[in-house]
């Protein structure tokens, strides 16, 4: 079974972690992220040859620092932005695998899927830098969606968020509490997310991870996930 292509995975990434508003204008998709981070704020090209100055002007008119996301097929735009001094940020990979290869029914009382998230889930996310603006992104995501909470030794030890677009379930915002890392919690969340996705009729589980996160990438590769495509951001010089 062939994995989804880059276009489908990037569409699922955007759909399951949505901006507050996306404007299609002058060959660009321009995003109002409402403080939810780069993923919901960066402009992406909607057609070859689009004038990047139009996107820059739109962002600057909103008082924002120009930010672009570059993916497959954007080599020319990437080179043009580099020539203008735009800095590379967060080179990332999108991993994917069939849910049937990943799904693991969690042991009793070890992992729960629910929505809305509990207060303890919000606390764990906040500790990891996932604050209210990113929780609002989750609220905007399409249904079906779920928050995942992992438990060990009668306490919450990790969280994640999963939502679906077409046949692809995307896992976001995985956070394991300090002191519980490298103890199988990430694998529990990954397998539980795939189990939830399978129950919702998804064919694939996918996620984005920075290239620098070697530990997480090793976990995903051990589980049988493959890196399908990459992307990165470029930010305007100050």
Image (cartoon, rainbow, N blue to C red):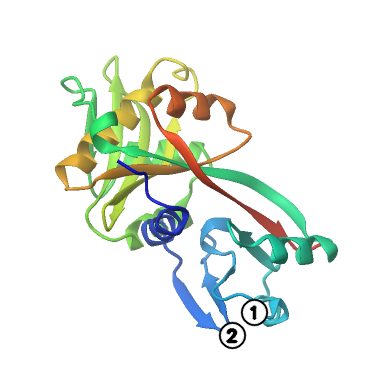
Question: In the image, is residue 36 above or below residue 22?
Answer: above
Q: Tell me if residue 238 can be seen.
A: no
Mark 2 and mark 1 residues within 8 Å of each other at the beta carbon: yes
Quarter of the figure with residue 15:
bottom left
Left or right of residue 46: residue 149: left
Query: What residue is rendered at 23% in x and 58% in y?
Result: 143
Q: Quadrant of the C terminus?
A: bottom right
Horizontal and vertical percent for residue 216?
50, 29
Label 2 belongs to which residue? 26
Of 73 and 145, nearer the camera is 73
Horizontal and vertical percent for residue 66?
70, 68
Left or right of residue 143: residue 46: right
Q: Quadrant of the N terminus?
A: top left
SS type, badge 2: loop
Question: In the image, is residue 5 above or below residue 34?
Answer: above
The circle drawn on residue 50 is: 1
Q: Earlier in the sequence, mark 2 or mark 1?
A: 2
Q: Tell me if residue 196 can be seen.
A: yes
At label 1, counting other C-alpha atoms closer than 10 Å, the crowd grade (few under 14, some 14-19, many 20 or more) is: some
Of 139 and 79, nearer the camera is 79
Quarter of the figure with residue 80:
bottom right
Query: What residue is rendered at 38% in x and 43% in y?
Result: 206
Direction front: furthest residue: 1
Query: What residue is rendered at 59% in x and 69% in y?
Result: 43
């Amino acid at each position: 079974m062939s994995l989804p292509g880059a276009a489908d995975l990037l569409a699922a990434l955007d759909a399951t972690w949505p901006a507050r508003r996306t404007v299609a204008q002058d060959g660009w998709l321009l995003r109002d992220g409402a403080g939810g981070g780069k993923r919901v704020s960066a402009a992406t090209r909607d057609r070859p040859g689009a004038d990047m100055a139009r996107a820059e002007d739109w962002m600057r008119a909103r008082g924002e620092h120009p930010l672009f996301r570059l993916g497959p097929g954007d080599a020319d735009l990437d080179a043009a932005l580099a020539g203008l001094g735009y800095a590379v940020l967060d080179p990332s990979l999108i991993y994917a695998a069939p849910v049937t290869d990943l799904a693991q029914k969690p042991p009793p009382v070890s992992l729960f899927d629910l929505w809305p998230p509990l207060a303890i889930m919000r606390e764990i996310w906040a500790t990891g830098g996932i604050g209210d603006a990113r929780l609002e992104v989750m609220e905007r995501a399409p249904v079906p969606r779920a928050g995942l909470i992992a438990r060990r030794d009668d306490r919450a030890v990790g969280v994640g968020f999963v939502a679906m677009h077409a046949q692809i379930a995307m896992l976001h915002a995985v956070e394991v509490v300090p002191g519980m890392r490298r103890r199988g919690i990430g694998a529990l969340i990954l397998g539980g997310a795939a189990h939830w996705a399978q129950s919702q009729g998804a064919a694939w589980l996918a996620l984005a991870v920075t290239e620098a996160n070697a530990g997480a990438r090793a976990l995903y590769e051990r589980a049988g996930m493959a890196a399908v495509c990459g992307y990165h951001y470029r930010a305007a010089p100050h």
